[in-house]
Image: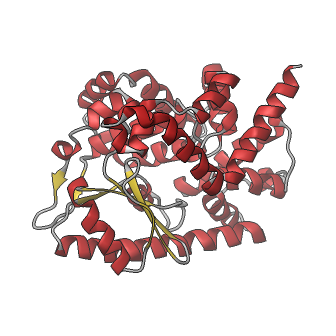
Amino acid sequence: MAVLTEEEYISTAKEVSYLAACAVNGEKPDKERVAQMNPDHLFYVAKRHQLAAVTAIALESAGVKIAEFTQAKGKAIRKNAALDIDRAALAERLEAEQIWYVPLKGAVLADYYPQFGMREMSDNDILIDAGRAGDVKEIMKSIGFAVEQFGKGIHDEYYKQPVSHFEMHRALFFSYDDQLYEYYKDVASRLKQEDGTSARFFSNEDFYIYLIAHEYKHFSGAGTGLRSLLDIYVFWRKFGEELDKSYLEKEFERLGIADFEKKNRSLALRLFSGEELSEQEEELLRYFVLSGVFGNTQNQIAKRGRWRYVLENIFVPYRRMVTEYPFLRRLPFLLPFCWILWLKRQLVKNRKRIFLKLRVIFNLRKKKK
């Protein structure tokens, strides 16, 4: 595994961004520049941001083949194909049962990238009619999925060997996400219907608003990585000219994230168009780069403080716990009992992640002395 200093990591991330830009813009990378890149560093950073496949495509267009990148691209293509096949089978059953559904995020964005497999996928996210979640569970089981989680939080999780992971959302945001939750509380009213089908979809404007809202949730928590910026660039490059800008401005103001959207869109467009970044944009890019695709513990600790972060992960606030244990709405005095259940579940399900977090907390404390 590559060991990089922070500055080496950021420098390499900029090279990954350059190669991703070449791939989505249909341009060949400069061979001399590619020759100066460290393949091990490049793969390490690209992998952390789920950009290995798009980087591989750019390198191959320059006549460079590296085994790790070739394998990553092959895996991305196979996984995307498996997800597409399983999503088509699911859609057929949902149609038969007349259950409305909406593909979200990567399930839609992947089609906007210029080459299949270019946009790596962790899973498929689909919004469903919450009142039919039990029926959806039976459908998922009937098409070969195992139930990983059901009835907790805002989405149910299903897995099918070898690589298909689906999250079936009953809502888009938790109640503790405040403005985002309120905005999407009646999400069905924002959806359009495909003629004669149970499929629903957002308008291009509303899809972009949800894309940014979802990114904001991650950005303001643990952070989010370069793939989020590339998604914005790819979407805006395809639809930007035809979007209703006045509607977008009004809705982002209503959500309280207008400034966030403006800065992130500017960074995405300038970064992947090869334009020089301002000092402020360089600082924002640094945050994206060091976050990785799913954010990191350091960002959470920096925003909350070490001890507040530790306490909130042990004694999880009521408004978060009630999404995991809905009976708390009727029996709030059972909150301490639920903390015990929560900790036991985390130790079984996420033991490795907990030890990694503890190591980060310990290292941060050590640096402060």
Residue 356 versus residue 179 in the image, above or below: below
Residue 344 or residue 31, whichever sits in front: 344
**Image spot of residue 36 (x, y percent):** 84, 51
Instruction: Name the quadrant containing residue 71.
Output: bottom right
Q: Is residue 119 left or right of residue 174?
A: right
Q: Is 196 or 150 nearer to us in this picture?
A: 150
Front residue of 324/337: it is 337
Residue 59 sits above or below residue 346 on the image: below
Locate residue 340, reporting x and y percent: 56, 42
Q: Quadrant of residue 223?
A: top right
Q: Is residue 278 visible?
A: no
Q: How many marks?
A: 0
Q: Image quadrant for the C terminus?
A: top right
Q: Is residue 364 visible?
A: yes
**Residue 329 against residue 277 in the figure, above or below:** below
Residue 246 lies in what quarter of the image? top left
Q: How is the image coloured?
A: secondary structure
Q: Position of residue 163 (x, y in %)?
A: 54, 72
Give residue 53's position: percent from left, percent from top. Answer: 62, 63
* Residue at image point 54% right, 58% down: 26
Q: Residue at x 67, y 36 (%)?
A: 297
Q: Residue at x 58, y 30 (%)?
A: 312
Q: Residue at x 62, y 36 (%)?
A: 288
Pick the front one: 315 or 192: 315
Q: Is residue 198 left or right of residue 167?
A: left
Q: Is residue 254 left or right of residue 216?
A: left
Q: Which quarter of the figure is the N terminus placed in?
A: bottom right
